[in-house]
């Protein structure tokens, strides 16, 4: 029968793996939040520029201002598209790291349950052995009393 110390070493290893997976997941979540925040800021900037453009149209707008607006909004749109791809990749990476974390946690729990079962089994074996010893002692005392 495998000793409990072996299982405890494996449990320690799985716990370290779980902590690494948690760190990786947290890093990927931070990266996702960073990219998503940048995307939000660009979308907000584009929205503000469009609102300013709408008010400028009512007050009158030169051709130069119109061209610069379209150039600026075009550049923002390109940046937004690039950031949307980065957000998608970051989300995918974050979901992948979350799956790894879940798998790591499951593996840790498996070893934890296995150790608990082994401890319970050993305790049951000890109690059974103690009962047999007590029965043996009782039989010996009975035989000794008869002599």
Image (cartoon, rainbow, N blue to C red):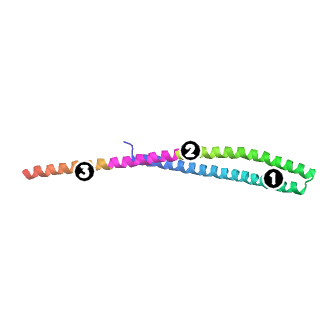
- Residue furthest to the front in view is 58
Residue shown at 57% from the left, 51% from the top: 22
Q: Earlier in the sequence, mark 1 or mark 3?
A: 1
- Proximity of marks 2 and 3: CB atoms separated by less than 8 Å: no
Q: Nearer the viewer, residue 138 or 48?
A: 48
How many marks the image carries: the answer is 3
Relative side of 91 to 14, left or right: right
* Residue 81, percent from left and from top: 75, 44
Residue shown at 70% from the left, 53% from the top: 37
Mark in the foreground, 1 or 2 = 1
Q: Secondary structure at mark 1?
A: helix
Within 10 Å of disc 3 (Cα), the crowding (few <14, some 14-19, many 20+) is: few
Residue shown at 93% from the left, 53% from the top: 62
Q: Earlier in the sequence, mark 2 or mark 3?
A: 2
Q: Which residue is mark 1?
A: 50
Q: Which residue is mark 3?
A: 130
Mark in the foreground, 2 or 3 = 2
Gap between marks 2 and 3, in whole Å? 45 Å
Relative side of 31 to 112, left or right: right
Within 10 Å of disc 1 (Cα), the crowding (few <14, some 14-19, many 20+) is: some
Span of residues in magenta? 103-122
Gap between marks 1 and 3, in whole Å? 84 Å
Residue shown at 83% from the left, 54% from the top: 54
Q: Quadrant of the N terminus?
A: top left
Q: Earlier in the sequence, mark 1 or mark 2?
A: 1
* Residue 137, percent from left and from top: 17, 51
Q: Which residue is mark 2?
A: 100
Within 10 Å of disc 2 (Cα), the crowding (few <14, some 14-19, many 20+) is: some
Q: Nearer the viewer, residue 77 or 1?
A: 77
Q: Nearer the viewer, residue 140 or 114?
A: 114
Relative side of 54 to 108, left or right: right
């Amino acid at each position: 029968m495998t000793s409990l110390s072996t299982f405890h070493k494996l449990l320690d290893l799985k716990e370290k793996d779980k902590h690494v997976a948690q760190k990786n997941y947290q890093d990927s979540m931070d990266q996702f939040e960073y990219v998503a925040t940048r995307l939000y800021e660009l979308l907000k900037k584009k929205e503000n520029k469009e609102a300013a453009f709408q008010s400028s149209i009512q007050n009158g707008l030169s051709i130069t201002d119109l061209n610069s607006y379209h150039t600026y909004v075009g550049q923002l749109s390109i940046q937004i598209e690039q950031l949307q791809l980065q957000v998608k990749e970051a989300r995918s990476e974050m979901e992948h790291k979350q799956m790894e974390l879940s798998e790591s946690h499951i593996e840790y729990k498996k070893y934890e349950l296995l150790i608990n079962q082994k401890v319970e089994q050993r305790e049951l074996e000890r109690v059974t052995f103690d009962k047999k010893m007590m029965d043996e002692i009782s039989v010996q005392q009975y035989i000794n009393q008869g002599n």
